[in-house]
Image: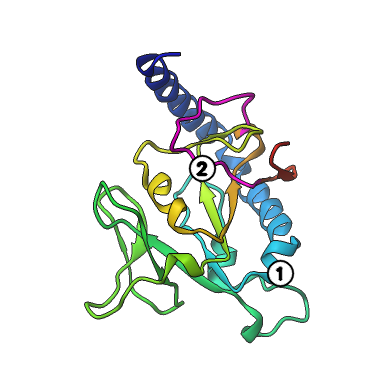
């Protein structure tokens, strides 16, 4: 496909996946619960000290139990065993995301794009991206080569190269897996995808 065809394909697939998520909205709680269990039982979650998460939009996988600390590493975990959770903040349209530590009582705000993000103080610096162990990445579609279709803003495309040691984990409902997606030269593939049907190493 040429560039114009790829753009049209991605636009159509984004619309189709948004409609599919809406159609399955009643299943979101149960599907999300299964995904959470797959995540917390994984060795990468158990060993990561710094996790870059995301605040879920209403139709995305609900990862809020990870955010609030309602789910620990194991039944015997203590607060000190929890990983440090980071949340992304949009800086400008053409730059990488900034990530800030999430605190239960910390300030959050709604971005004009509808995203819930940190509202740091004027003297609070973003967390160093090269120190992130695990990054959970939202998506609209993904294939078994680890190619991800996002929302079109390119934020993670610009951010992932800066998370040099982070394990790249896509988070999706199983119906968001597709046979194949076009990959651009700058696309960084995911290393695994977790869905309500289980954990899929790349290539799957």
Q: Let me know if residue 187 is in the magenta part.
A: yes
- Left or right for 89, reference 61: left
Predominant SS along the magenta part: loop
Q: Are marks 1 and 2 in contact (CB under 8 Å)?
A: no
Q: Nearer the viewer, residue 29 or 158?
A: 158
Secondary structure type for disc 1: helix
Q: Residue at x 22, y 77 (%)?
A: 122
Residue 64 locus on image (x, y percent)? 54, 62
Residue 99 locus on image (x, y percent)? 40, 65
Q: Let me know if residue 188 is in the magenta part.
A: yes
> Which residue lies under the disc numbered 2?
188
Residue 105 locus on image (x, y percent)? 41, 79
Query: Which labelled disc corresponds to residue 46?
Result: 1
Task: State which quadrant residue 12 falls in.
Answer: top left
10 Å neighbourhood of mark 1: few (<14), some, or many (≥20)? some
Above or below residue 14? Residue 32 is below
Task: State which quadrant residue 178 falls in.
Answer: top right
Mark 1 or mark 2: name the one nearer the start of the chain. 1
Q: Residue at x 26, y 47 (%)?
A: 94
Residue stretch rendered in magenta on the structure: 177-192
Secondary structure type for disc 2: loop
Task: State which quadrant residue 37 falls in.
Answer: bottom right
10 Å neighbourhood of mark 2: few (<14), some, or many (≥20)? some
Q: CA distance from mark 1 to mark 2?
A: 24 Å
- Left or right for 70, reference 77: left
């Amino acid at each position: 496909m040429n560039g114009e065809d790829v753009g049209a394909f991605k636009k159509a697939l984004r619309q189709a996946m948004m409609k599919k998520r809406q159609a399955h909205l009643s299943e979101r709680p149960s599907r999300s619960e299964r995904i959470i269990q797959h995540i917390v039982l994984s060795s990468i979650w158990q060993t990561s000290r710094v996790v870059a998460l995301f605040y879920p939009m209403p139709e995305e996988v609900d990862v809020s139990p990870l955010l609030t600390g309602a789910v620990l590493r194991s039944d015997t975990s203590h607060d000190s065993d929890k990983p440090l959770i980071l949340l992304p903040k949009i800086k400008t349209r053409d730059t990488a995301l900034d990530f800030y530590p999430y605190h239960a009582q910390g300030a959050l705000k709604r971005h004009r794009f509808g995203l819930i993000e940190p509202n740091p103080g004027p003297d609070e610096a973003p967390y160093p991206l090269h120190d992130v162990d695990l990054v959970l990445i939202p998506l609209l579609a993904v294939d078994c080569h680890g190619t991800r279709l996002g929302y079109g803003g390119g934020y993670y495309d610009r951010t992932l190269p800066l998370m040099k040691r982070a394990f790249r984990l896509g988070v999706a409902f199983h119906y968001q897996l597709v046979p194949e997606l076009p990959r651009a030269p700058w696309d960084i593939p995911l290393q695994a995808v977790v869905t309500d049907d289980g954990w899929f190493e790349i290539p799957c």
